[in-house]
Image (cartoon, coloured by chain):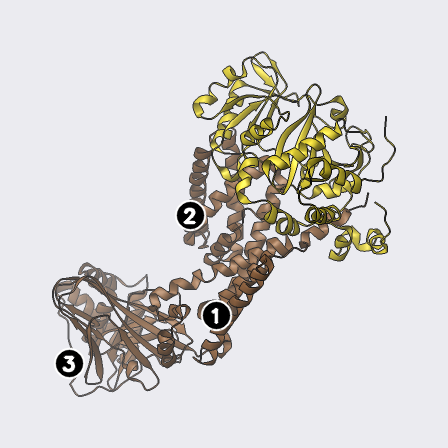
Amino acid sequence: MSAQAKLITTVVLLCALGGGLAAYKSQKLGVPFWQDQRVDEWLVEAKISFLATGRDVKARLALPSKANDQNAGQESGSLGYHYDVEEELGESTAIWSSPKREEGQALYYRVRFKEGPVSGGEAISPIGEPIALEVPNLPGSLGTAARSIVEGAKGLSEDPDALFVTFFKQINSSDASQEYVLVKRHYEKESLAFPKITMGIDFLGMAGVPARLAYGVKLNDELVGQQPLPLLEYFDGAAWKVRDPQEPSKVLDGRDVFVWHRGGGPLLEVSGGVENSKVTFTAVKDRIPLSRLTDLRNSPFLVSTILGLPVSERAVFRYIVLIPLGAFVVVLMRNIIGIPTLGTFMPVLLALALLEIEPLKAILMFTFLVGAGLWFRFLLSRMNLLVVPRVAACVVIVTLLMMLMGVVSYQLGFSVGIKITLFPLIIIAWTLERMSLIWEEEGKRSAIVQVSGSMLVAICAYYFMKISQIQYWAFYFPELLLVLLAGILLVGRYTGYRLSELIRFKTFSNA
Amino acid sequence: MPEENPKEEDAARSRWWHRWFRTPGELRELGVVGINMRNARYLLPNNPRRLYELVDNKLRTKALAEAEGMTVAETYGVLRTPHDANRVEKLLNGREAFVIKPTRGSGGKGIMVIDKRVGKNFVKPSGAEVTPGDVKNHVSNILAGLFSLGGKRDYALIEYRVQPLELLTALSFQGAPDVRVVMLHGYPVMAMLRASTKESDGRSNLHQGALGIGIDIATGISVHAIHHGRPVTHHPDLGIGLVGVQIPEWDTILHMAVTCQEMTGLGYLGVDLMIDRTLGPLMIEVNARPGLAIQMANGIGLLKRLEPIVAEHQRNPAADLAAKIAFSKKHFRANLPPVRE
């Protein structure tokens, strides 16, 4: 077969495979193809992890009441564990048990529900049992201070809602009265898990309002493996209500927070001599109905299994699937348009760095760092250093410059510097070295042209990767990357003129 | 070549947009080859990766050329280790003029030319003095891979400083002009002389402002010249006319270029030569990725020559050196201006 025929066959095969899989997923499995058709569902995953020490293990995780909803779906993942759900007085608990476990263990529980204003923290009437009021016993001056605070608040209003707001506004505020500071210091010394909330619960108890700890999850795609969000549940005389002590005057919005556990009991209990037990949550907006997901996971296609990964693992792919898109943009810009860049894939790396920092800030930062770094680099070159020490010196200088930028921008009130990570550091140090070499060898014009070219390509790649429909396809239809691959292969055989060559050869004159 | 094609006439005609660009159609009519086409059609199929080593390493290219009986610049010494860098002075053995270059350099990077000595110091062609310490540092940089392809560790080569013919130095502002011949399947395609200007600072890279002077393959007479892509007739700094200059020993040059193709096995390549006052043409280096500026320098699209060669190569794959040179000379003869005396 000629090279041409091979290429065409490969391209057709790739398109058929990628397109076919995508069509199958959207037509048969019901994954919406367009982003705006999406079902706004949240998938919240609890991941219990602990270190088993060889004894029989039993883990109990309190489950959200929403899990019992008609519209919601749930499932648990736990290889080799016996799994059961226990229900008591409208509260359910998942129980995993297994004999003789060793080493690190991970158990998963997933809940899925439609996005909406209902957070699960709405007022509910008490069931059965009488409400016991716990009044804490604070000794001496501490007790006096606490009583004075409570009396003061009750003097304003006896209403439980108002008391809750008053207490927590004071607790959160930075210029609280002497009495608050005194009591707060006591609670912080006690080294409780949530000193501020415990303090609020005690105040409410002293004021005659029963209160207890509840747990929620922030509905934010970007927080992977978040800690349980401590919330407070209190009894207003007729019903229990859950509120966020950080924002006392706001009713919980089901679009921001999901109440995982209320009712007072512990969130997680692990028995069996385990160490480091903890539960973390990951929330992702999911676009595939749960009923379909199981089909998808059982489907034989390897590419579909990315959706079968635990949510916390899957979130990593959010960035990884974007890299091929950036590479595609680089191919177009270099081979069709003909923009010169520093190295081939440096613009992709830059574009990824842009995704981490805002583009405008990133460009300013990059320009500053490259400019300043280049100046230092020339100072170094006067000393006639060998190559490797010189690159190392560059890295040290760039690190110091970044720290300087971080401090300065923090003091000026920007938070640019804070997010600078290892990744941009390496890119910038490397850019400096390449750029200064080109500067010396081919002149400053060439160096500036190539660096600005890289920046331009990086910005194009960034905006391309930023299109939410593109991100959606890359994440939910990764098989479409095969079609992209076919496109790249086709560009690889493009023998026509680059756009820049139309300008380069404009003065072509026949001899 | 007779110009009868009316479409080509059309493409050559001046249009308002030529100030900014030319359309792809026009460039195709002119036979201009772009980077993508060069790579996909000529480089990739004809230059297997494994052969690149032969030309990317100047030591190997020189060894091959010497085995073919070709004249090359004499090697004074090769510095391989940092320890060798301290022995530069000894290796030079009191020589007045020499060139230090990386064995794996590209595009003229890292080449240091020394014309003479003044006391302990060395003098570059520009008149600038360098100390023995500077020379040692330069060697260290070469050894560390500063100038080599891909930044690999490298060796430094010390060799004979070519004394170019006055005829050629007259065309160049400092620096020695070199002759490049581009070949496909061993057929000479196009040739040009690269002469430096004040702007290019002794270097012969066209995009740094050096002059590209197209040479007629059949006769070795210069026919056309460009500076920054625009046609010129005189050297911008020296004022000397650039067209109508006869390059001496042209047949030897073509013969050497074709031999270079045979010894490396590369299908598409550029051979760089210099002409010494006493030694005649010397092979300097072979380039496996020759640029496209040569078609601007000659005022002829490369495709107009590459296509007949591909056809001829298919018709007659076993042609020998003489037949190939004869073919190129016959078919690629330019409309000559009168020879300048």
> Sequence order check: which comes first, mark 1 or mark 2?
2
Indicate left or right for B313 with B225 as reference: left
Chain identifier matching the brown colour in the rendered picture: A
- Frontmost of labels 3 and 1 is 1
Tell me the distance, in whole angstroms, between the alpha carbons under discs 3 and 2: 52 Å
**Would you name the residue on which mark 1 appears?**
A472
Amino acid type of the residue tagged 2 in the rendering: Val
Q: Colour of chain B?
A: yellow
Tell me the distance, in whole angstroms, between the alpha carbons under discs 1 and 2: 37 Å
Image position, residue A299 (x, y; %): 38, 75
Tell me the distance, in whole angstroms, between the alpha carbons under discs 3 and 1: 50 Å
Location of residue B130 (image quadrant): top right
SS of the residue under disc 1: helix
SS of the residue under disc 2: helix
**Would you name the residue on which mark 3 appears?**
A132
Image position, residue B334 (x, y; %): 82, 40
**Image height of B30 relative to B61, above or below:** below
> Sequence order check: which comes first, mark 3 or mark 2?
3
